[in-house]
Image: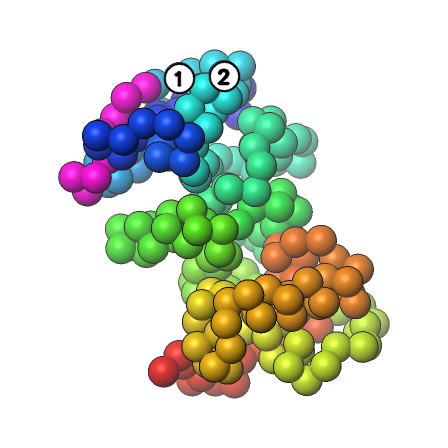
Amino acid sequence: MLQASAAIVVESGISGDGHSLAIVADRRLPVAALAALIVEQARYRLVHHARGIAAIRQAIDDFRPAVVIIDATWSQGMSPVDALGCNENVLILLDPEDDPAVFVQAASARARGYLSRTAKREALYDAIERVRAADYYLDAAIAGRILGAIRQSGTAGAPRTGLSERERDILIRIAGGRSTKEIGREYAITPKTVGNHVTNIYRKLNLRHRGDLVLYAAKQGLSLPSGAAIE
């Protein structure tokens, strides 16, 4: 991550906090490719490049992007999120066939979104908008392959009890990649009510963020019924 590069794109005709995106990678080509995909939308224009951790951190501090997209190698040392000093408005790109341990490490970074590097551009746009709206995004490819591998690894601990049936169902849907709005539509409740349920789940399971919830559900073998879909 020491030789990381970054690009800042800003919504055309708009300036100020919350109207830019930061794209960070440990190679220049992914940064250029991702920036090109995003600026294909007439909504964005490229305004800044940075190279090296110090310069990237300064750019993030200066532009205060609504979303920080990170495409970097996850090693056993400091994570890219910690190295950059990012908050929770982070979208992490991962390979769906990676070792499950990579997702475990990435999930501990308190990111709001996890997207497969093989995802189509429409999924990238959707993930960006969900993270921007402070919702959670989990790519189905990652949920199906990486979390499936975690379930099969036999690492489940003793299940923690105390969740209501509704809370358990919501936890399962979060682990399946459902957004807050999708869960709300399914149960005919408001996103705020979904958020209240999630807060109760955190408290009862002594967990702190969505990545923790996803890992807990995976380790306990909790998943949506085969073929379950949003109406």
Residue positioned 33% across, 50% down in the render = 124
Quick check: marks 2 and 1 in contact, CB under 8 Å? yes
Residue 47 lies in the magenta stretch:
yes
Image quadrant in which the C terminus is located:
bottom left
Q: Element under label 2? A: helix
Q: Which of the numbered marks, if any, corresponds to residue 58?
A: 2
Q: Is residue 54 placed above or below 43 in the rendered structure? A: above
Amino acid on which disc 2 is placed: Gln
Q: Examine the rendering and report whether any part of residue 29 can be seen.
A: no
Residue positioned 45% across, 68% down in the render = 181
Disc 2 or disc 1, which is closer to the eye? 2
Q: x and y percent of residue 115 in the render?
A: 43, 52
Amino acid on which disc 1 is placed: Ala
Q: Which of the numbered marks, if any, corresponds to residue 172?
A: none
Q: Element under label 1? A: strand
Residue positioned 62% across, 43% down in the render = 109
Q: Is residue 65 placed above or below 165 in the rendered structure? A: above
- The disc, 2 or 1, on the residue closer to the chain's N-terminal end is 1
Residue denoted by label 1: 50
Residue 221 lies in the magenta stretch:
no
Q: Is residue 48 placed above or below 76 in the rendered structure? A: above
